[in-house]
Image (cartoon, rainbow, N blue to C red):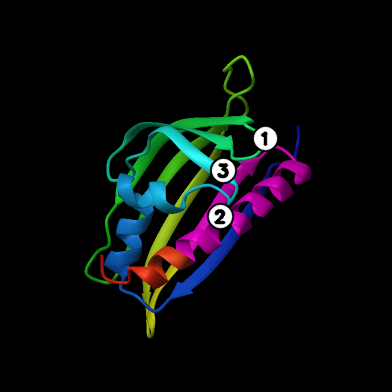
């Protein structure tokens, strides 16, 4: 049996928990930051405000390469009175024949801090270290877009 790999990323923001929550769950907000620079989003059905299926296709701006992924939103717990909430979803890439590959699990947790809020992203059950490193690079190339969104529109 293979050892599954997990990764965790944490970001602090000087904005409210509700603002970060909207950015990581609302479809129009997700479309503004999800996916690394250099990719354009197309045909994305991403509503992390409710449980159920989600899907997104991204294309390389220069290469035209297609990257499709899909999954199920497994839980949605909006921020409570203590300022903590989470949304979890499965994640699977599709191959060139549109066959869904190995499934992993992602959870976004938002929580209040003394200076604003914290976003914790945990991506679990990745099949090997190489895949975990690839996903880490992907998240690290994606999060600056979220940083910019929250900096530009701190109250939306």
Q: Which mark is residue 133?
A: none
Query: How far apart are labels 1 and 2 at the CA level?
Result: 18 Å
- Chain part drawn in magenta: 120-147
- On the image, numbered disc 2 is attached to which residue? 142
Crowd band around label 3 with a 10 angstrom C-alpha radius: few (<14), some (14–19), many (20+): some
Residue 133 position within the rendered picture, expressed as x and y whole percent measured from the top left: 73, 50
Instruction: Tell me which label, 3 or 1, sits earlier in the chain.
Output: 3
Q: Is residue 130 magenta?
A: yes
User: Is label 2 or label 3 in front?
Assistant: 3
Q: Which mark is residue 63?
A: 1
Horizontal arrangement in the rendering, residue 49 relative to residue 117 (left or right): left
Instruction: Where is residue 7? Give x, y as percent.
Output: 63, 54
* Residue 75 falls in image quadrant: top left
Q: Secondary structure at mark 1?
A: loop
The answer for how far apart the CA atoms under marks 2 and 3 are is 10 Å
Label 3 or label 1, whichever lies nearer to me, is 1
């Amino acid at each position: 049996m293979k050892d599954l790999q997990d990764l965790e990323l944490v970001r602090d923001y000087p904005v409210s928990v509700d603002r970060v929550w909207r950015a990581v769950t609302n479809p129009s907000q997700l479309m503004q930051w999800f996916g690394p620079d250099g990719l354009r989003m197309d045909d994305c059905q991403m509503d992390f405000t409710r449980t159920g299926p989600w899907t997104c296709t991204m294309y390389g701006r220069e290469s035209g390469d297609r990257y499709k992924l899909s999954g199920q939103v497994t839980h949605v717990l909006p921020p409570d009175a203590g300022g903590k909430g989470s949304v979890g979803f499965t994640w699977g890439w599709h191959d060139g024949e549109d066959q869904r590959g190995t499934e992993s699990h992602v959870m976004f947790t938002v929580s209040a801090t003394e200076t604003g809020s914290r976003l914790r992203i945990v991506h679990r059950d990745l099949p090997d270290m190489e895949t975990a490193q690839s996903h880490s690079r992907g998240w690290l190339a994606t999060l600056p877009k979220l940083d910019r969104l929250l900096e530009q529109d701190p109250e939306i």
